[in-house]
Amino acid sequence: MKDIYKVSPAPHLHDHTSIPKVMWNVVIALVPALVAAIYFWGLRSLWLTLAGALSAVVTEALVQKWRKLPVSVADGSAFLTGMLLSFNIHAAAPMWLPVVGSVFAIIVGKQVFGGLGNNPVNPALLGRAFLLASWPNLMTSGWIAAKKGAISGMNDLSLIADSLKTIAPKAHALVTSATPLKVAQTLRDSTWVASLTSDPKLNNEITQNIFNNLFDLGTLKALFVGNIGGCIGEVSVFALLLGAIYLLWKNIIDWRIPSFYIGTVFVLTFLFGGIKGSSPSIMLPFFHIFAGGLMLGAFFMATDYTTTPLTKKGRIIFGIGCGLLTVVIRLVGGYPEGVSYSILFMNVMTPLIDRFTIPRTFGEVKK
Amino acid sequence: MRLKTFPGGVHPHDSKHYSSSKPIAEAPLPARVIIPVSQHIGSPSTPIVQVGDEVRTGQKIAEASGYVSIPQHASISGKITKIDVFPHPTGNKQLAIEITGDGQDTWIDLVNDENYLNLSTKEMKDRITEAGICGMGGAGFPTQVKLSPPEDKVIDTVILNGVECEPYLTSDYRLMLEKPDEIINGLRIIMKIVGAKRGIIGIEANKPDAIKLLTQKTQSQSDLSVCPLKLQYPQGAEKQLIYAATRRRVPSKGGLPMAVGVVVQNVGTAFAIYEAVRFKKPLVDRIISVTGAIVKEPHNFKARIGTLYAELVELCGGATETIGKVISGGPMMGFALPGLEAPMTKGSSGLVLFNEQEAKFLEERDCIRCARCVDVCPMNLIPSTIASAVKYKNLDLAEKTGLNDCMKCGSCAYVCPAHIRLVQWIDTGKIRWAELQRSKK
């Protein structure tokens, strides 16, 4: 009998998905956010993003060449890592910063573990953590203001900024230079409040005033559109949601992690997001889910395949865990933002979560 | 109305348009047939003829070798010319009986029992056993065994499987359109044998005319109904079909449909049961779809068991392009064959030809843990974990994550972006697990 036809195990059909298709689709989904960044901060956002993405690609190719492995950079996974890393850097950062971050992310975050599919934590977030630990100043200060808005992008705050200039210079500095989350965090700091002026009553008044202006509709609008200071990738909630809808529609990400992540942050900040003397407001949770890197983190980083749970129940636990940690860091911890650390922490928990959430087989009887 | 279905599953393009409009055509009598002694699940049958023997169509040539076994019959009249190993439609070579035809097609004596529905259940079962019928949807479990639930099991429902969820295949669909009364009478026989009060025919929504026709035919019979189902693979899998139609879950770890009071039979099997009980006709022919984008004239044949695939392809005018892959059965669970020299058997529902592009081999990469396999698995398993556990010889973990509950439907491998042969790894694991259990004893 002559063997003429291809023999392979069933199934003989495939839905034509592939790793490159998945990865490049995520890159496409990040394009609206990049466009928003260019709109608000200029072309430098694009150059920084490309610097990060391309250096990640080159690093991965070199490592694979050196290890005599097939070079797989065309699959877009390294490009995506570099792109996400750059998205965590602000538009005034030096050009070498994303390059160093990407090299670290690819080598230490990914290739030492065996490359795609074998890394324990999100390489882009690991790269960001490395940069933040090594060059905290470059990472957290020197933001440029959004071109189309006031300092910090919060129009209502800029209205009160002038009146603060002479009464409380420290408060003026805060509302004119910090990101919204930093402002929110600082207002919770009682020693900072006490140091504003010599009059405790006035201090409280100033704090309340800033607080009320921070958590209002104007701020929410600015956050939603992207008219604020911040990292390249987190600027516009609207642009990020466009990308997220694309990924959900293409069935590339699962709804569970983002929904439970954002939902947990929403509920917890509604309950605990106020400051002394403030009244509960629906503005609090909306501020917290729109501000900072939550949208970017929840839809694009906490949904990274390799570093998140396989099981459906596990993904829910993962989302809730991220939300809980983010809120704890934002409201209690020492950093204004907790998205990246909470995702990194939950990444490490993933094997354990998977282990304890093995689903019941169809038809399995409850024991 | 929202159509019923089951959790999980995938939506491959059904590709049934190639052959769905082709009426069943009687294939010309083959000059030679090869009848494998194993066409079913269970022990192979034992040949009772010798080379040189003259046989008539329908004559028994191999007898059942145990309880879970079936006899085989000559599908043409002629002379036994060889008893040897021949290519088998599962891809390997197995013992088979070759008959060279005399062109006469002289049959054994058949009967025509007008009163067949009033036969005793024992007589009905005897006729089915004698006819050598096994499940004709593909798995091939001996039918008389399925129709003999233990005394203590109460069966209240018989489900006829007209789902045909495998892409391309249209043999069950054509049979439902062209032989609806026979199928319904087959269902009546099965219901009588197992004592069921209710009969359901499950059909997917991509066969609206079959749903309409069988609904009309069963309208006046209050204990029969047609259950239209949402298009979703693998709805034709027994446990999934039972859940879709009755919301009952067959227990895992080797549970059988009878545990939830259900017996499932394929519509083709029901037709064979009807013929066996009414005419005492052994299972010597069946409907088979020969189809694919490159088949010149796709057909639904009524062909004799043992007809060579090569002959069927020739009857379709061959292929319009170079053949890349030959699939015995459907493309999701069927076997890729190295050649066309294998014969069709009782479980051969289709023969699908792929061109070289469709047969392209996808390179396997490392798992990226995307969990698509988890999301589509109709059995709620973790296919990627089972596969890697088998790969790294951790059979305990594989078992814990569902190794032995996998029915190999292939949904996981169908959606895997890393193109991992998940089913093959799991199958390997099943074999190793079975070996391990045997060595423990």
Image (spheres, coloured by chain):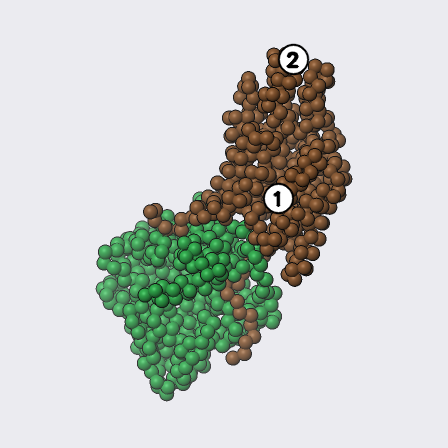
Nearer the observer, B85 or B313: B85
Q: Is residue A126 left or right of residue B270?
A: right
Q: Residue at x 49, y 41 (%)?
A: A316
Q: Is residue A31 left or right of residue B374?
A: right
Image vertical order of residue A213 relative to residue A50, above or below: above
Looking at the picture, which amino acid does disc 1 mark? Leu
Gap between marks 2 and 1 measured at Cα: 43 Å
Q: Which chain is brown?
A: A
Q: Residue at x 51, y 29 (%)?
A: A268
Q: Quadrant of the rendered structure where residue A217 is?
A: top right
- How dense is the environment of label 2, judged by Cα within 10 Å: few (below 14), some, or many (20 and up)? few
The colour of chain B is green
Nearer the observer, B98 or B224: B98
Looking at the picture, how far across and down is residue A185, in whole percent? 61, 26
Give the mark, 2 or 1, whose residue is nearer the N terminus: 1
| Residue position for label 2 | A198
Q: Residue at x 64, y 42 (%)?
A: A130
Q: Which labelled disc corresponds to residue A126?
A: 1
Image vertical order of residue B168 relative to residue B379, above or below: below
Looking at the picture, how far across and down is residue A16, in whole percent? 58, 57
Q: Residue at x 29, y 71 (%)?
A: B66
Dot 1 falls on which chain? A
Looking at the picture, how far across and down is residue A295, in whole percent? 60, 37
Looking at the picture, how far across and down is residue B70, in whole percent? 33, 71
> Nearer the viewer's eye, disc 2 or disc 1?
2
Q: Which labelled disc corresponds to residue A311?
A: none
Q: Is residue B295 left or right of residue B404?
A: right
Secondary structure under badge 1? helix
